[in-house]
Image (tube, coloured by chain):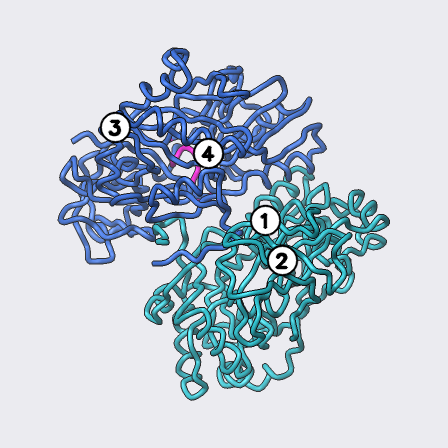
Chain colours: A blue, B cyan
């Protein structure tokens, strides 16, 4: 299916380079182009697991919260305690509405005193944060700065990053960041990213540096077989990485999403949705994210929720599914009712090409 | 360019029918599929101007605001006075943030006592409205109901609508609505839509009725040459219909967008952004939306803002552009600086295939 282009589907500082690299498919994420395929999804997957890729993830827009009430506001947004959100740490911070429904699952960085970046998944969280700030009369500025993350992912990513940013890269711990020099400027560099192959995210500050950064990475990585890539659906399902809008929506609580460990209700006083989550913390969720191994040949594209049942009883839904070449079976992520969520439970999945058997699995998939 | 599909790019109650009708292209709008092309853009345009089309515009999501403070909240969202927002009227309501920057340009309907639908363009306005409501402690519920508009557009649309909904359709005035029966239910039917060819929008309430509605329209319209279509970029630029995200963004005020007539600052007390707009109401905007007639052969796709200058001086940008087969020249919409906005002013437009001459024009284009 063709994507009709317009200015509304925003280009990024890297789009010219992405197109020169032969991008074959896009999705749209935060009103912005996100490259999905360069060769085939399976060839990209194979390369990601063996080498190093550069991903245009500028669509991970930042919501900047700045001002005397910035910390107070950011803590209102998430049930995760931000007591240890210091400069240099990346915190995965589920954000919920007043009913405890997931609005986004961003990573939050304290980038300066009274200044935070919330690196968002696919919803206009800026509008939520601005709305809460204005409604509550808080002393903050909330904006979308000119910051466009570029990810470097894969087993050779550290080697490539050291060549470009120096040996300091090796000392960056997982979900930690440093500000490292690049030419006449400096970028926040974090050990993070939307794959399980290891890697980094460079928070490009100033779109005018985008092509220089891209070119330096490709020049330095030629003998590492560096290629352009993007979040790979096969690899991310194998790895159990959730996708907002696919595997979770406003309908779901953090507990349903398996994110209960980030709900610190005894500490996150004042967070929106706390009352609703307190109830669920006691009662436990009625359904929860699980892996699902689906029998048979490669499944078709999962473009809508596939109903899941067991013995005629409704048991949940599958929300992401792909054939895994490495594992040799179909990997899927779904929301499974409590009655059926034990690993090993047999299920029936109503895929568009017919009903298939399946088995509840633990995430990430291992074999 | 291919669009990579996933559940996150939501299907609509009509998507199966749209695919059966041979859709060739989509865009993504409010995280949902919006069909753009069925034959060619020019053939679709020609057909729209001569016959009647059915458009899946389910992506015009509704933000429902309900409760004792509903009116107060909706008036906070827009500088347009809602004093005459009664049941049966559709009001075009620019919505702005605290700086007066456009967040969306929806149509607002009062559908019941203390219950409003805000029919949105492409931004998650739901999050803004919820944020303001919660931050302000207002007594309202804000939600996205199961409502999916289907548009019937083109010169034969009234004839088709009368066949399906009865003669009452003829009495619906422009930007007015009636609730009309359909089988065992009833839908809000408005004389409105995103074309200048005349037509209606049916607010399908309950996705389960979607295919029945689609099928009845196609069965009743066979001899009217009814076809599936979608908002047509050529026709909407000719007609001067603005597109949020293309022609206006948070960067722009309603005055810049030529929507100053909807800023009733003496009446819309309490509206967010009023202070910022009051200043601009006095000083006037520094730039404003204009038509631009672009010289030469058909322009390439406008996928980013094209810089506009005049004699080496920055004069604005073009944000939408297409070749018009009927007019025989390139029609465009852009934001033009005050120094150059008089109709007839000559401009230079930096299109991706080279600099072209152009002329400031009045919207809509007529010749």
Labels 3, 2: front one: 3
Label 1 with label 3: CB-CB less than 8 Å: no
Classify the position of the C terminus of chain B by image quarter: bottom right
Magenta highlight on residue A157: no
Subunit of label 2? B
State the residue position of label 4: A211
Rounded to the nearest whole Å, what is the CA distance between mark 2 and mark 4? 37 Å
Q: Secondary structure at mark 1?
A: helix
Q: Is residue B253 left or right of residue B297?
A: right
Query: Mainly helix, strand or loop, the magenta region?
Result: loop
State the residue position of label 2: B106
Q: Residue furthest bottom?
A: B223
Labels 3, 4: front one: 4
Rounded to the nearest whole Å, what is the CA distance between mark 3 and mark 2? 47 Å
> Mark number for residue B125?
1
> Mark number for residue A51?
3
Subunit of label 4? A
Have a look at marks 1 and 3 and say if they share a chain: no
Classify the position of the N terminus of chain B by image quarter: bottom left
Residue B143 in the image: state x and y as whole percent: 55, 50
């Amino acid at each position: 299916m063709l994507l009709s282009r317009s200015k509304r589907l925003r280009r990024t500082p890297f789009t010219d380079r992405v197109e020169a690299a032969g991008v074959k498919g896009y999705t749209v994420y935060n009103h912005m182009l996100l490259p999905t395929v360069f060769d085939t999804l399976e060839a990209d997957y194979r390369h990601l697991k063996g080498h190093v890729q550069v991903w245009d993830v500028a669509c991970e827009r930042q919501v900047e919260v700045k001002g005397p009430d910035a910390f107070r506001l950011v803590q209102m947004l998430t049930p995760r305690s931000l007591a240890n959100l210091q400069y240099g740490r990346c915190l995965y911070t589920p954000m919920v509405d007043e009913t405890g429904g997931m609005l986004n699952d961003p990573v939050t960085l304290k980038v300066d005193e009274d200044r935070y970046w919330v690196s968002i998944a696919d919803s206009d969280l800026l509008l939520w944060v601005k709305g809460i700030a204005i409604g509550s009369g808080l002393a903050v500025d909330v904006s979308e700065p000119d910051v466009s993350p570029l990810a470097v992912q894969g087993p050779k990513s550290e080697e490539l990053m050291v060549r470009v940013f120096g040996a300091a890269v090796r000392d960056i711990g997982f979900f930690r960041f440093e500000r490292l020099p690049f030419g006449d400027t400096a970028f926040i560099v974090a050990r993070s990213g939307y794959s399980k192959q290891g890697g980094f995210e460079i928070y490009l500050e100033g779109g005018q540096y985008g092509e220089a950064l891209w070119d330096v990475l490709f020049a330095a990585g030629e003998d590492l077989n560096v290629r352009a890539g993007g979040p790979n659906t096969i690899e991310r399902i194998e790895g159990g990485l959730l996708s907002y809008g696919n595997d979770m929506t406003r309908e779901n609580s953090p507990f349903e999403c398996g994110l209960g460990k980030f709900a610190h209700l005894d500490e996150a006083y004042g967070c929106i949705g706390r009352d609703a989550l307190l109830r669920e913390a006691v009662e436990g969720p009625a359904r929860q994210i699980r892996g699902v191994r689906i029998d048979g040949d490669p499944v078709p594209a999962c473009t809508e929720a596939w109903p899941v049942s067991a013995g005629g009883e409704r048991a949940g839904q599958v929300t992401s599914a792909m054939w895994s070449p490495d594992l040799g079976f179909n990997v899927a992520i779904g929301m499974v009712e409590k009655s059926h969520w034990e690993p090993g439970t047999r299920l029936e999945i109503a895929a568009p090409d017919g009903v298939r058997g399946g088995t509840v699995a633990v995430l990430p998939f291992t074999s």
